[in-house]
Amino acid sequence: MEPTEFLSTARQLVATGSEGAYRSAVSRAYYGALHACNVLVPAEFAPSQAEMHSDGSHNAIIGAMERWGRSLGAGRTDAQMAAKKIAQLKRWRVVADYRIRQKWDIDAEKWVRVAEEVFRLVEAARSKRDGQVANTAI
C-alpha cells in the first residue's frame, strides 16, 4: 500500500458530507501525510526501529522531518514546512478520532489540502536532496 491511498480515501470521504466521514477524512489525510514523511525522510534522519515500535512513533517521524529540515540550512526549508504542517494535522486528527463529543466545526477539506501540501513539500525536499547527492557523485 502507498501513502497516496490514504489521501485518495480522504478525498472520497470528504465528498460524502457526513460528520463521521469528515472526521475519518482528516484522520486518513493525516496518516497518508505521516506515511509519506516516513517513506521519504533520508535514512540518516529516520527514526530508529525502537522509536517506530514505541508509543511515540508519530512524534519520532515528525522529529525526523524537523531534523532533516534544520540540516538543510537556515530559513524555512520544504522539510521544515512539511514537519510543521504534519504536526498541525496531528492535532486535528486527535480531535477527529478521540473527541467525538466535541462539536465538529472543522473544515475537513482544508485539512485534506494541508495533507496534499505535506506530500508536495516532502517530495520536493527529497527530490532536491537526491539531485544534490547525484551531483556530488559525479
Image (cartoon, rainbow, N blue to C red):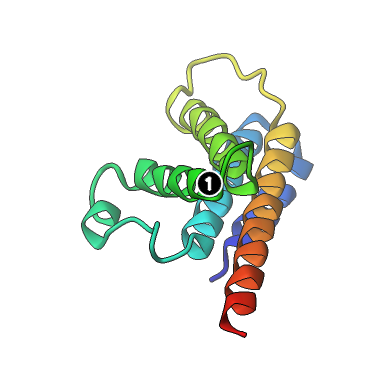
User: In the figure, residue 44 lies in which quadrant?
Assistant: bottom left
Identify the image quadrant of residue 132.
Answer: bottom right
Q: Is residue 118 above or below residue 102?
A: below
Indicate left or right for 52 with 31 as reference: left
Q: Residue at x 41, y 66 (%)?
A: 43
Circle 1 residue = 69
Badge 1 crowding class, 10 Å Cα cut-off, few under 14, some 14 to 19, many 20 or more, is many
Snapshot quadrant of residue 49: bottom left
Q: Position of residue 12 (x, y in %)?
A: 73, 51
Give coordinates of residue 5: x percent, y percent.
63, 62
**Quarter of the figure with the C terminus:** bottom right
Residue drawn at the location 35% of the way across and 46% of the way down:
60
Secondary structure type for disc 1: helix
Q: Amino acid at mark 1?
A: Gly
* Whether residue 103 is situated above or below residue 37 in the rendered picture: above
Q: Position of residue 82 (x, y in %)?
A: 60, 44
Give left or right: position of 14 versus 87: right
Farthest-out residue, top: 103
Residue that protrudes farthest toward the right in the picture: 15
The x and y percentages for residue 86 are: 55, 40
**Residue at the bottom extreme, as displayed:** 138
Query: Is 10 displayed left or right of 93 in the figure?
Result: right
